[in-house]
Amino acid sequence: MSLRYLSGGESHGLALTAIIEGFWANVEINLEKINLDLKRRQSGYGRGGRMRIENDELKIISGLRQGLTLGSPITIQINNKDFQNWEKIMDPIFDHNLKENRIISRPRPGHVDLVGGLKYQHKDLRNVLERSSARGTAIRVAVGSICKQVLEEIGIKIISYVTQIGKKSITDNIKEDFEDIFNNAEQSEVRCPDLQTSNEIKGEIDKAGSKGETLGGVFEVVVLNSPPGLGSYVHFDRKLDAILSGALMSLQGIKGVEIGLGFEAANSYGSQVHDEIFYSETSGFYRERNNAGGIEGGVSNGEPIVLRCAMKPIPTLSHPLRSVDFISKEPFDAQIERSDVCAVPAASVVGESIIAFEIAKVLKEKFGGDSLDELKENVNSYLNYLEEV
């Protein structure tokens, strides 16, 4: 059985939900770790008013008993506290005759409002933005946080950090190891591991907010201690780089993904790009640099998997851009919804969870197993084989 999940819920609906299928049995789940990841997602300099309303906590409805997974579907839920203010407007069943007072017909440039309304034949664009809202990333963080806990059991860790917001970026190469980078990022309000750059970024966010503007940026997600052999070169849709980059592109606001050297490789000679291969009795096959970003030919090579994401500025502006009314076709200023000035730090946390699920999924495909012990046995057998090659 493969690992998969299905999520449901609207931004101002009763709750966000997900059902995870194919997860291993006998994995001890720490609810506090999941809630900590949910809190990390809600934090960050430049977040908006919704973060002061919600205080996300996960409720596990099925699939666990006494803290251990059962192997059956795991059902999880995050309640939307703001639903109490929207109950009549978002009622799933009854029409409270209030819809006309809150109908949204002014699509926002940069959002899916217009094309979503056209696709599903909605006249009220709230039916589009409620589901497309980044509020839905909360449940993705919860799913990924659950997956992190099984990955930790076999030594895999996933981290993230911000390298740029607006025009402020880390100019020098980061010289610390990835663990130090992550720890430094966790101490920063913008999740940037460099203190000076963090302060400059906060000033940039303040400046943008005072102008009614928003900012995008760049963050990196890194998979540590991944075994070689995840993914496939045999089938195009099973290439690990395609899977991971596609998953990150599903995150709201992401407009570009690089792996390893990324676009810089296009400006360099081949000898400057490709990672030479070495061998020693103690380390086996290894590389002295990681321009490939841990993936070669669609398969992990044992080096850290380094993924870089470019996030556009949030399109919801306090000084709205011009648009056209969906119903009357008259020109208007676009609808204003509550928004952040910058959500790049939060997006980096979501990116961690997105990648955690995808890594867990390819682990399931390669190593199988219905229980944690069976997974560990299969992984250890493979690692022993690698040592003997």
Image (cartoon, grey):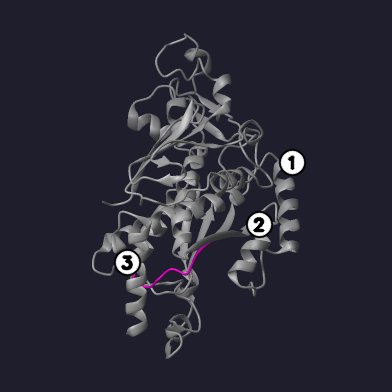
Task: Tell me the element at label 1.
Answer: helix
Disc 1 and disc 3 in contact, CB within 8 angstroms: no
Where in the figure is residue 155, as x and y percent of width and height?
47, 66
Residue beneath disc 3: 378
- Dot 2: few (<14), some (14–19), or many (≥20) neighbours within 10 Å? some
On the image, the x and y values in percent for residue 96 come to: 47, 9
- Image x and y of residue 156, in percent: 47, 64
Look at 28% across and 52% down and name the residue there: 2
Tell me the element at label 2. Answer: helix
Count of all numbered marks drawn on residues in the image: 3
Residue displayed at 61% across by 47% down:
40
- 305 horizontally vs 55: left or right: left
Q: Amino acid at mark 3?
A: Asn
Please give the label number shown on residue 320: none
Q: Can you tell which of label 2 and label 1 is closer to the viewer?
A: 2
Q: Quadrant of residue 368?
A: bottom left
Which contiguous range is marked in magenta? Answer: 221-230
- Magenta stretch contains residue 49: no
Q: Are marks 3 and 2 in contact (CB under 8 Å)?
A: no
Choose between 154 and 265: the one closer to the eye: 154
CA gap between label 2 and label 1 equals 26 Å
Which residue is more in the foreground, 59 or 112? 59
Q: Is residue 129 left or right of residue 376?
A: right
**Label 3 vs label 2, nearer the camera:** 3
The quarter of the rendered structure image containing the C terminus is bottom left
Mark 1 crowd level (few <14, some 14–19, many ≥20, 10 Å Cα): few
Q: Residue type at mark 1: give it.
A: Ser
Residue 316's place in the image compared with 252, above or below, is above
Residue 106 pos. (x, y %) = 50, 27
